Amino acid sequence: MAQSVDTDDLREWLAHVDESETTQFLMVAIAHDQGVSASDLASWYGRSTDEIDDWLDELERRPLPVSIAAREGIDFEALADASGLNRRTIVDWFGSLASSEVTQAADVIRRYSQQSPGPLLGGTESRVFYLNHEVLAEHGWSLEDEDLFEKAADVDLDLEDYGRFLVKPGETILEAAEKRGRSWPYACRGGACANCAVIVTEGDVAMPGQTVLTENQVTRLNARLACVGVPATSELYLVYNVQHLEQFEDLRLPSPLTDAEPLQ
Ligand code: FES
């Protein structure tokens, strides 16, 4: 059995799953841990020995929350499409729940199986480091600079231009920024423009339901929308105030922050 899963965790998970196959999967894992053979388990649960062997193999190579999420009906492909992230990232998120309390991990899986997307790392805070795009030109920096945030840390920038804050479970990045006193650009606040766009330089952000950014903007430019985006990693580095870049020209709305004048 995978070293990270102990029998107490397996028993605790039993109280949090709904599908009969998930229950059987956990029961097989517990019984096998207690020395019951695959052929006996196959006979107990009316399955083939090959199927039981596959389950036991899965327990060795896959984080338990991923196996449970798949059996509880979570569609990794659909979540990848809805969030603008790739399937591997989605699967890795669920895998990272292995380090959470079982009740927290189960809550995330339940919300996603019921198709009520929220922060994928539910129950976990994320630390966001931010940099204002306006200061890049002043200092001769570029979004491509690998040490962009190291350079920013070495100069004396205002809190408005450089800093960090925590995003709590249930908060979008824009909400968290505002609650902590930052004033970042936005317009629709609903994923329908690019006024709140940020460029992620490290870490990742999920955007459940976003349909505005193109695949190119998401995968090549690493753009995300702060108003609907929730951190998918425990640390995140992003450049905000990028809505004036030409790549977002067709997606800018008049801003409520500037008396309905279009952002330049
Ligand atoms: S403010 Fe329009 S997408 Fe975020």
Image (spheres, grey):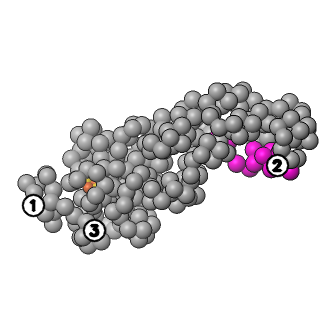
Q: Residue at x 26, y 72 (%)?
A: 246
Q: Which residues are magenta?
A: 50-66
Between the C-alphas of marks 2 and 3, the distance is 50 Å
Contact (CB < 8 A) between labels 3 and 1?
A: no
Between the C-alphas of marks 2 and 1, the distance is 63 Å
Relative placement, left or right, of 69 versus 212 is: right
- What x and y, as percent, mark residue 45? 82, 37
Task: Please report whichever mark, 2 or 1, sits nearer to the chain's N-terminal start.
Answer: 2
Three-letter code for the amino acid on which mark 2 is drawn: Glu
The residue singled out by tag 3 in the image is 248
Of badges 2 and 1, the one in the foreground is 2
Q: Residue at x 79, y 40 (%)?
A: 1
In magenta stretch: residue 63:
yes
The residue singled out by tag 2 in the image is 51
Task: Please report whichever mark, 3 or 1, sits nearer to the chain's N-terminal start.
Answer: 3
Q: Residue at x 53, y 34 (%)?
A: 107
The residue singled out by tag 1 in the image is 261
- What x and y, as percent, mark residue 235? 45, 47
